[in-house]
Image (spheres, rainbow, N blue to C red):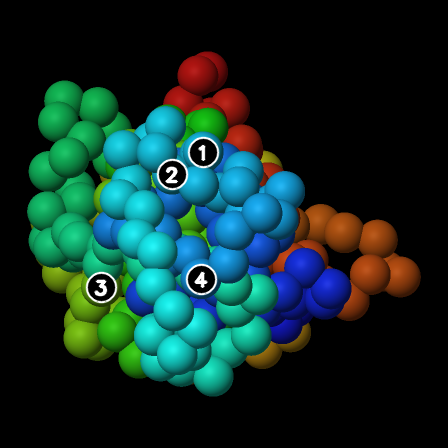
């Protein structure tokens, strides 16, 4: 798993509440991250002025405040005179995701221990690209939908619902009772992804964190474990990359 990167572009709070810093705020506004308000303490800077233009163009309220107020709202995160307040994400109900497929064969992704919001957003983007119907994540020890996830999703979070569940294992068991097959990605699995006979069925694809993989209970809940064949020189794939490969293969099977 790669940690969230801030580098020289300013820092972004992954609480889902605010994005702080000139470049991160402009990037978030360009990505149409749902926002409540843009708070500005300083004017005259090219990037701050661009943030104001983007916010007004997107219907986001612009509020001019003093530095003390901006410091309070930033909660200690360096803000460079500008801060974007992000709307709270409305999570879907995990039991509703299968229903969203309607008459189409359901395709869901469940994440087990994926804690990087950039990975979550990239996975949502792949779900949208390959005709999936939603993503389910645990409430604890998992990435949630933050501004970082919105940006990585390239806006597809507006079309692909993310649900939270108290207990992922029990939720997977409920999906199985409703007729879905649960297939987990595991590097040690004996079956290659392309050899699975379940990919065209009602499917919940379970992906674990890079390196750590799926938890024991989740593995035991799966109907099948499959692996993505990779070169021996590579230890594992990033979670979002592995998910994209698996979703492509599922889409290919469904098209046959």
Nearer to me, 86 or 230: 86
Instruction: Please name which of the two marks, 3 or 4, marks the residue nearer to the observer.
Output: 4
Query: Which residue is identified by label 4?
Result: 41
User: Is 83 or 9 nearer to us in this picture?
Assistant: 83
Label 3, label 4: how many angstroms apart (C-alpha)?
Answer: 36 Å
What residue is rendered at 63% in x and 72% in y? Answer: 3
Q: Earlier in the sequence, mark 1 or mark 4?
A: 4
In the rendered structure, are the residues bearing label 1 and label 2 in contact, judged by CB atoms less than 8 Å apart? yes
Instruction: State the CA–CA distance, disc 4 to disc 2.
Output: 15 Å
Which percent across, then down, holds residue 74?
41, 74
Which of pointers 4 and 2 lies earlier in the amino acid sequence? 4
**Which dot, 3 or 1, sits closer to the camera?**
1
Instruction: Give the mark, 3 or 4, whose residue is nearer the N terminus.
Output: 4
- Residue at the spot of label 3: 164
Q: How far is the residue under mark 1 from the one under mark 2? A: 5 Å
Picture residue at 38% right of the left edge, 44% below the top: 33
Residue at the extreme top of the image, as rendered: 256
Where residue 175 sits: x, y (%)? 18, 54
């Amino acid at each position: 798993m790669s940690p969230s990167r801030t580098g020289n572009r300013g820092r972004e709070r992954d609480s889902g509440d605010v994005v702080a810093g000139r470049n991160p705020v402009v990037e978030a506004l360009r990505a149409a991250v749902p926002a409540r308000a843009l708070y500005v303490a300083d004017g005259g800077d090219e990037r701050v002025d661009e943030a104001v233009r983007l916010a007004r163009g997107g219907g986001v309220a612009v509020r001019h405040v003093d530095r003390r107020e901006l410091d309070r709202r930033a909660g200690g995160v360096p803000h460079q005179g500008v801060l974007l307040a992000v709307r709270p994400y409305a999570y879907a109900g995990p039991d509703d995701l299968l229903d969203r497929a309607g008459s189409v064969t359901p395709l869901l992704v469940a994440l087990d221990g994926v804690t990087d919001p950039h990975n979550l957003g990239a996975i949502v983007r792949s779900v949208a690209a390959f005709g999936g119907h939603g993503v389910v994540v645990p409430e604890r020890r998992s990435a949630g939908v933050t501004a970082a996830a919105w940006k990585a999703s390239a806006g597809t979070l507006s079309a692909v619902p993310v649900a939270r569940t108290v207990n992922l294992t029990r939720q997977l068991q409920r999906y199985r009772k409703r007729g879905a097959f649960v297939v987990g990605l595991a590097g040690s699995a004996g079956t290659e992804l392309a050899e699975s006979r379940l990919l065209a069925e009602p499917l919940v694809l379970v992906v674990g964190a890079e390196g750590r993989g799926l938890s024991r209970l989740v593995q035991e809940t799966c109907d099948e474990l499959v692996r993505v064949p990779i070169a021996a020189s590579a230890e594992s794939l990033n979670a979002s990359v592995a998910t994209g490969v698996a979703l492509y293969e599922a889409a290919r099977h469904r098209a046959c």
